[in-house]
Amino acid sequence: MRRTPQYRERERQWRNGSGWRSYRNSYLKYRFGITLEQYEQLLIEQEGLCAICRREPSRNFAVDHCPKTGKIRGLLCYSCNISIGHLGHNVATLLAAVRYLQASR
């Protein structure tokens, strides 16, 4: 049962120990081809902020990558990551959206 105090304590210990780091490292390597250390270096370079909106995320950063090349572009908050995804990662569409917003001022 997940709601028991014993379960929550084991989960807290796992997250604060090496279990979480090992899991996160494996996930990042499998999904994006980077290590946890490389992820943390990106986080330092971005000063802990989203690469687009420069805000702290309310949840974990998304590792933004080019869908065609797989190249890592940076770390984004959920909103920015979803936004560029909905625009199809298309620069022309994004610039058209910028022009649209500027014209409405």
Image (cartoon, rainbow, N blue to C red):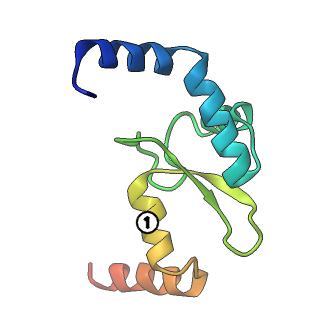
Residue 55: horizontal and vertical position, in percent?
41, 44
Q: Is residue 8 left or right of residue 35?
A: left
Q: Is residue 1 left or right of residue 19?
A: left
Give the residue number, with chain letter if any, for mark 1: 82
Q: Nearer the viewer, residue 65 or 102?
A: 65
Question: Which quadrant does the N terminus fall into?
Answer: top left
* Residue drawn at x 68%, y 33% as measured from the top left: 36
Q: Residue furthest front?
A: 1
* Residue drawn at x 48%, y 80% as measured from the top left: 87
| Amino acid type, label 1 | Ile
The answer to whether any part of residue 44 appears in the image is: no
Residue 90: horizontal and vertical position, in percent?
58, 82
Helix, strand or loop for disc 1: helix
Q: Residues within 10 Å of mark 1 (few under 14, many from 20)?
A: few
* Residue drawn at x 74%, y 37% as measured from the top left: 35
Is residue 4 positioned above or below 105 on the image? above
Is residue 87 positioned above or below 9 on the image? below
The image quadrant of residue 82 is bottom left
The image quadrant of residue 79 is bottom left
Q: Is residue 24 left or right of residue 70?
A: left
Is residue 75 positioned above or below 7 on the image? below
Residue 69: horizontal and vertical position, in percent?
77, 70
The answer to whether any part of residue 12 appears in the image is: yes
* Residue drawn at x 24%, y 13% as measured from the top left: 5
